[in-house]
């Protein structure tokens, strides 16, 4: 079973010159084949997203713009991680509860997912999550 110790931040390689910065996400940066890409934006600062875990999906979360906090929870421990750099990727394995809050103005949250959307693989009730990880 995964724990919050399996959640990790990876630096995305970047190339910088007088024209700006180019960040590159290639196969060796993401520990899975990407099946879905989605992003969140215009999230009010007092709102939160997530509030679920995945049975099958692994995710990588990137703050393309602005900042937000990702709270990860393995049923025993919780950790709050601020993402505010577009060259940092937060890897979240399966069976980790996640919530995203504290969105700054203009924040854009990019998620790379290992599965296509399947409602049946979500755990949306925290009590059910706790039962599943014990």
Image: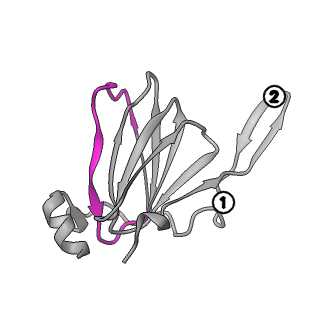
Q: Measuring from the top left, give residue 23's x and y in whole percent.
A: 69, 45
Crowdedness near tag 2: few (<14), some (14–19) or many (≥20) residues, C-alpha within 10 Å: few
Residue 24 lies, in percent from the top left, at: 69, 50
Taking the image as shown, residue 34 lies to the left or right of residue 20, namely left
Q: Which residues are magenta?
A: 40-58
Q: CA distance from mark 1 to mark 2?
A: 22 Å
Q: Is residue 53 magenta?
A: yes
The residue drawn where x is 27% and y is 31% is 47
Q: Quadrant of residue 134?
A: bottom left
**Residue 19: mark in rendering:** 2
Tell me the quadrant of the picture where the N terminus can be found.
Answer: bottom left
Q: Residues within 10 Å of mark 1 (few under 14, many from 20)?
A: few
Please tell me whether mark 2 sits on a helix, a strand or a loop. loop
Please tell me whether residue 100 is drawn above or below residue 9 in the rendered image: above
Magenta stretch encompasses residue 41: yes
Q: In this rendering, is residue 44 above or below 96?
A: above
């Amino acid at each position: 079973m995964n724990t919050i110790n399996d959640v990790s931040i990876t630096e995305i390689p970047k190339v910088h010159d007088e024209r700006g910065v180019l960040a590159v996400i290639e196969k060796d940066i993401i520990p899975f084949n990407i099946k879905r890409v989605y992003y969140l934006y215009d999230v009010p600062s007092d709102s939160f997203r997530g509030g679920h875990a995945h049975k099958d999906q692994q995710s990588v979360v990137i703050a393309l713009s602005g900042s937000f906090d990702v709270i990860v929870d393995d049923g025993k421990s919780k950790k709050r991680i601020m993402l505010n750099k577009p060259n940092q990727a937060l890897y979240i394995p399966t069976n980790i509860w996640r919530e995203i809050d504290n969105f700054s103005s203009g924040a854009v949250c990019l998620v790379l997912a290992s599965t296509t959307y399947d409602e049946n693989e979500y755990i949306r009730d925290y009590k059910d999550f706790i039962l599943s990880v014990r």
